[in-house]
Image (spheres, grey):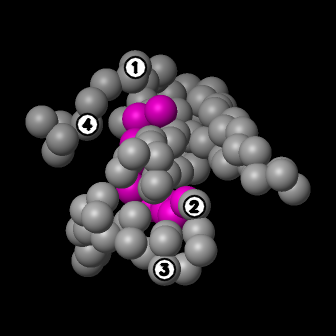
Amino acid sequence: GAGYTFGQDVSEQYNHVNGLSLIARAHQLVMDGYNWSHDMNVVTIFSAPNYCYRCGNQAAILEVDENLNKLFLQFDPAPRRGEPEVTRRTPDYFL
């Protein structure tokens, strides 16, 4: 797939111009299910635990309440009968 890379200056300017305090983005593997970046102006959320049955990553869901308080719910994959347990490791393509 294609993507667009932007730096902290762009995220800060975008949030300021649009009256926002956070960009929440998804669909990029992060091992803990979520990852803050750009001085907490951007958060990446990944909701597929043990991606491709081999990455050993956690997944996360972001809950935001009426006062804009944020809570991340992290979870591990459900066990699969007959499948070996995958240990948490950095996928080869990140090395």
Q: Alpha carbon of mark 3 to alpha carbon of mark 4: how far?
A: 37 Å
Q: Alpha carbon of mark 2 to alpha carbon of mark 3: how far?
A: 10 Å
Q: In this rendering, is residue 89 above or below 69?
A: above
Report the predominant secondary structure element of the magenta stretch.
loop
Percent of width and height locating residue 77: 60, 33
- Amino acid type of the residue that numbered disc 3 sits on in the rendered structure: Val
User: What's the magenta region?
Assistant: 22-32
Q: Name the outermost residue toward the right.
A: 66
- Amino acid type of the residue that numbered disc 4 sits on in the rendered structure: Pro
Label 2 secondary element: loop
Q: Which residue is mark 1?
A: 87
Label 3 secondary element: helix
Residue 72 falls in image quadrant? top right
Q: Which residue is mark 3?
A: 17
Q: Earlier in the sequence, mark 2 or mark 1?
A: 2
Q: Which residue is mark 4?
A: 91
